[in-house]
């Protein structure tokens, strides 16, 4: 594990993340990668160079100084796109492929579910749904959905 005091992070003039190690070496194009993006999003984040070599390990994002944490979280937000489904408005058909209308934490969305196998069960009660374009939608807790949404979802599980 690297201590945050052993390195610096900053954005260069082109908006790319730079890692400056304790030896003064600058690595451009550094990317934060979550070890467990769904089950423990804030636990275990690696800072890797463009070649996939780990430069630093962060046990907990909360342990970072505010400025450093904000930089890492902003980079993660740009890199990761996984809308969280809050409500299933409707489906075009209960046979697949089927077009789904949903509400997410990022606004309303529509996607095509190719088959039931594209709904993956994660650690209960979470589900991960992949649409026909490879975008993943997360349902954190299917029991927290409204009754209408749960009924639709149950038809596909």
Image (spheres, rainbow, N blue to C red):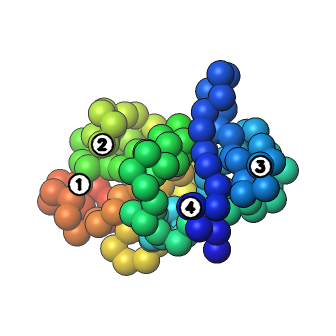
Q: Tag 4: Cα neighbours inside 10 Å, few (<14), some, or many (≥20)?
A: some
Label 1 sits on residue: 149
N-terminal label among 2 and 3 = 3
Query: How far across and down, in percent of the image, does residue 83 sit?
Result: 40, 45
Q: Position of residue 134 (x, y in %)?
A: 60, 44
Q: Earlier in the sequence, mark 2 or mark 4?
A: 4
Label 2: element kind: loop
Image quarter for residue 13? Answer: top right
Q: Depth-wise, is mark 2 or mark 4 nearer the camera?
A: 4
Q: Which residue is mark 4?
A: 4
Q: Earlier in the sequence, mark 1 or mark 2?
A: 2
Which residue is more in the foreground, 52 or 83? 52
Left or right of residue 46: residue 59: left
Q: Closer to us: mark 3 or mark 1?
A: 3
Q: Quadrant of residue 91?
A: top left
Residue 95 is situated, as x and y percent measured from the top left of the image, at 45, 50
Find numbered disc 3 in the image and state the secondary structure of the residue it sits on.
loop
- In this picture, is 39 found above or below 138? below
Identify the residue at horizontal 53%, vertical 72% (top origin): 59
- Alpha carbon distance from label 1 to label 2: 15 Å
Q: Residue at x 34, y 73 (%)?
A: 125
Q: Is residue 47 left or right of residue 54?
A: left
CB atoms at circles 2 and 4 under 8 Å apart? no
| CB within 8 Å, label 2 to label 3 | no
Of residues 35 and 121, the one drawn nearer to the viewer in this rendering = 35
For marks 1 and 4, give the CA distance. Answer: 44 Å
- Tell me if mark 1 has few (under 14), some (14-19) or many (20+) residues whose alpha carbon lies within 10 angstroms of its own: some
- Can you identify the residue that label 3 sits on? 24
**88 and 63: which one is in front?**
63
Q: Which callout, 1 or 2, points to the residue nearer the camera?
A: 2
Q: Which residue is mark 2?
A: 105
Disc 3 from disc 4: Cα separation: 14 Å
């Amino acid at each position: 594990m690297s201590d945050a005091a052993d390195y610096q992070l900053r954005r260069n003039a082109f908006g790319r993340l730079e890692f400056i190690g304790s030896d003064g070496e600058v690595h451009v194009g550094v990317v934060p990668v979550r070890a467990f993006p769904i089950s423990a999003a804030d636990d275990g984040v690696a800072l890797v160079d463009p070649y996939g070599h780990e430069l630093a390990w962060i046990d907990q994002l909360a342990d970072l100084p505010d400025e450093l944490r904000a930089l890492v979280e902003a980079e993660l937000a740009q890199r990761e796109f996984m809308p969280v489904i809050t409500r299933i408005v409707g489906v075009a058909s209960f046979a697949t492929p089927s077009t789904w209308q949903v509400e997410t934490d990022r606004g309303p969305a529509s996607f095509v579910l190719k088959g039931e196998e594209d709904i993956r069960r994660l650690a209960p009660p979470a589900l991960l749904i992949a649409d026909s374009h490879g975008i993943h939608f997360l349902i954190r807790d299917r029991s927290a959905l409204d009754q209408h949404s749960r009924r639709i979802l149950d038809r596909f599980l």
